[in-house]
Image (cartoon, rainbow, N blue to C red):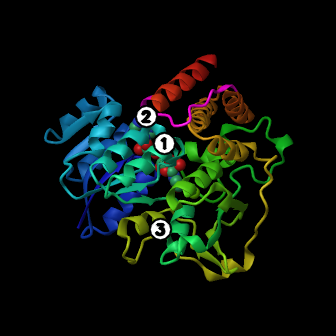
Amino acid sequence: MKKILILGATGSIGRQTLEIIDANPLDFKLIGVSGFNNTSLLIEIIQKYELSIASVKDSIQAEKIKKINPNIKILIGEQGLIDFAGFNPEEDITLINALVGMVGLKPTLRAIGINRNVLLANKETLVVGGHLIKEALKKSSSNLYPIDSEHSAIWQLLNGENKSSVKRLIITASGGSFRDKARTELEDVSLESALNHPNWSMGSKITIDSATMINKGFEIIEAVYLFDLGIDKVEAILHQESLIHSFVEFEDGSITAQIAEHDMRLPIHYAMYYPERKESIAYKLDFMKLNNLHFKKIDFNRYPCLSYAIEAYKIGGSMRTVLNAANEIAVRLFIEKKIKFLDIERIIKEEMEHHQVITFPSLEEIYTIDSEIKTRIYNQY
Ligand code: NAD
Ligand code: MG
């Protein structure tokens, strides 16, 4: 039986992870959860499972939880997330990081620091601190497993293969909620239409990130770190049905693909059971759907955020923090209806243009840059 801690249990990935735990009670034991916004759901989860630990936003939430479960250990705030990831360090527990945003970086490093396996959905962590995570992994016996449909696909496709025979990875992209719109039609798009993703039901931030396509840029960066390949070997292609989740092309000309319904419970399940394969609750593919697959090159002018992400990776160092911080805060402002959709890309571009790069930023420098950018931009609107 695997013991599980979930960071971000109230979110889209967190809730789907709970479904897998519920369906397989003999294989998984939930030890603790963190939650931030949705207090009533957090309380529901805490009432349902016999948890040892919970990490919450503030003392108000902590008080509410204490009332319904006086025995549970409660941690608070950002430090709470870090201590949560390091809970009972000598115990064999798997950490599932389903947080959104770079708030997940320190907890991930903490888990790696105590040789704990991490299943990572929280991609911003790799975008911003991939260099620190890679260093930490070298000194640790932890495994870092991806929870993202594209990276799960590549992980499966590379099983048993020699990495030096890989010519390129091709990550598929649905195109997001505005894929059928031209750039000229994006000026006044609403928040509601941006949140209406054609294929996936996800948290609001990643849904907006898919509409701007910065999500695909993040995933290219994620793939570079996870699979240790140069960024020039990772490409993205539009595939509106989201049934092929990635391709790997090998030196001999062979191309392999991973195919499944678009259901995140499969990549979560795969990471939770790895290296085993077991019956999953994910929707199974109707084979006839494969009669109707479409692929298209991505137009970088249509999706400039994809270029910004690749550029930020290539410039390196603290530019990746700038990319992410500007995006996180711009998406928040868009969700709060304080800026327009196209302001997101403008804000990212402006921040990147004005930044003086630190080549190998420390954790402290990353957090300082992140908070300076977020505070300054947020106060402008
Ligand atoms: P979500 O918004 O639905 O959930 C995020 C979770 O993090 C919630 O539990 C929330 O309470 C918590 N949280 C948010 N801000 C926090 C903060 N400042 N401090 C502590 N906790 C905080 O997001 P999601 O869609 O589940 O995505 C989670 C991560 O997984 C993201 O990095 C996303 O890019 C990635 N991802 C998601 C999907 C998907 O289908 N949803 C697919 C692939 C990758
Ligand atoms: Mg993805």
Query: Which image quarter is the C terminus in?
Result: top right
Q: Amino acid at mark 3?
A: Leu
| Labels 2 & 1 near each other (Cβ < 8 A) | yes
Q: Is residue 138 above or below residue 63?
A: below
Q: How many marks overall? A: 3
Comparing marks 2 and 3, which lies closer to the viewer?
Answer: 2
Mark 2 or mark 1: which comes first in sequence? Answer: 1
Residue 181 in percent (x, y) is at 81, 49
Q: Residues within 10 Å of mark 3 (few under 14, many from 20)?
A: many
- For image coordinates 54% across by 51% down, the residue present is 202
Q: CA distance from mark 2 to mark 3?
A: 33 Å
Mark 2 or mark 3: which comes first in sequence? Answer: 3
Residue 99 showing in the rendered view: no
- For image coordinates 84% across by 47% down, the residue present is 182
Q: CA distance from mark 2 to mark 1?
A: 8 Å
* Viewer-closest of 102 and 330: 102
Q: Amino acid at mark 2?
A: Leu
**Residue 79, image quadrant:** top left
Where are the magenta residues, as a range? Answer: 354-364
